Amino acid sequence: MSEKEFNGLWKIRTSFISELLLIIAGVAIRVFMIIYYYFSHLDPTISWGDVAVNFRTTDTMFTGEWIWDAGDLEYPPLTLYIILIFKLISFNSVEVFAFYAFLLDLLVSLSFYFVLKKFEVPKRNLILGLFLINPFVLLNNVFSPINCGYHITDSFFYIFLMLSLYFYPNENKSLFYLFSGLTMCSKWFTLPAALFFFLKFLFEKNWDEIKKFMIYLVIPIIIFLISPILYLPNYLSLYINWLSGVNTTLFQGIPIFIKLIPITVIFLLYLLFRVKKADLLEITFFSIIAMFSIMFWSRFYVRYLTPLILYGHLKTNNNIFTIDVDLKISRIYFRVGNHLFTFTLSLLGCVAAIAIILFVF
């Protein structure tokens, strides 16, 4: 419903019931999708898509081949270890594995409420509802028109990211650093933040934070991203393949030094003009943009930008821009805050993702 403010302008207000209905709708969509997938896969010729790829991705570990390539060991070791655990409790059944993918996505989505609460974001029920029905989130994490759309490895990333965000408002950032490090070790999306953090603390001569950063964030990176070089066969091939391999003909034949130009420019510009003023939350999410600038050469997926939706809802700004037109006979006033702005950009991202699917692949 809507009400008039004291200045005579209209402002949309929501009730608890309408907010609850949004949340129920978001959960219902996810429940419908898992039922749909099981029903459609009564036909054994239909692929389970990324769920099947994730399920098989550790196979070469047991055959002794250790193939670090697309479809085989294509994730950091921490993610592979977690996949092994879920395969074990799936009793080697891809159908059970898919159900865990559904549960993890639901867990991640609902856990966003506790992050919103920790950040003291107003209208938390409404924001959670908008997140649950966000078409960009649904397209990238739940639904695929061809096969099973779950990305269970992304859920691992989101779980650690949600934990890091939950502890971010704490004055002592140790747990934020710890789970940020584990987030980087599960997927590389936020990895540039590690260097940004260090340089920011160095510029500020904040030696206490550097000490915490080195203990809680750097040590997990050493354990899960760097030390595997010493004991996992052909482990460096993982990074070489991500930089050189392509899944579309669009970028074939482009030299590696050309691919490094965008992330280098973005990194330097942010370092020179923004990193000193930025808080750690902004740096974390900006690092996703920086990483996307190198990852899209080999995996041209707009879904890598999906975590930015979280930042859009956490950085409360009720007046990003305002349209105020006085036509004498009537006045048009429209104020766009961060939540509406985030949802609108999500719609554009959804359109971009569909366009890439239709015209690139």
Image (cartoon, rainbow, N blue to C red):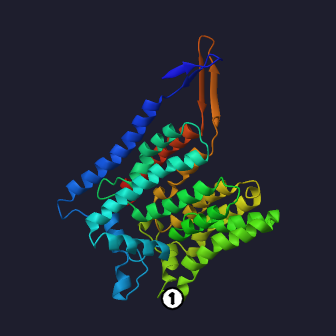
Q: Position of residue 68 (x, y in %)?
A: 43, 80
- Residue bearing the label numbered 1: 231
Residue 218, image quadrant = bottom right
Residue at (51% x, 69% y) in the render: 186
Q: Is residue 223 visible?
A: yes
Whether residue 183 is situated above or below residue 352 in the rendered picture: below
Residue at (76% x, 54% y) in the render: 277
Q: Count up the numbered dots.
A: 1
User: What element does badge 1 sit on?
Assistant: helix
Q: Residue furthest right?
A: 205
Q: Position of residue 142 (x, y in %)?
A: 37, 53
Q: Is residue 253 visible?
A: no
Q: Position of residue 327 (x, y in %)?
A: 62, 15
Q: Position of residue 229 (x, y in %)?
A: 54, 85
Q: Say which quadrant the C terminus sits in.
A: bottom left
Mark 1: give few (<14), some (14-19) or many (20+) Cα within 10 Å: few
Residue 9, image quadrant = top right
Residue at (43% x, 65% y) in the render: 153
Residue at (58% x, 80% y) in the render: 226
Q: Residue furthest left?
A: 43
- Tell me which amino acid carries mark 1: Tyr
Whether residue 221 is situated above or below residue 24 in the rendered picture: below
Judging depth in this view, the residue of 212 and 227 nearest the camera is 212
Say whether residue 177 is left or right of residue 198.
left
Residue 99, image quadrant = bottom left
Whether residue 169 is situated above or below residue 240 in the rendered picture: above
Judging depth in this view, the residue of 159 and 285 nearest the camera is 159
Judging depth in this view, the residue of 343 and 2 nearest the camera is 2
Judging depth in this view, the residue of 31 and 294 nearest the camera is 31
Say whether residue 37 is left or right of residue 258.
left
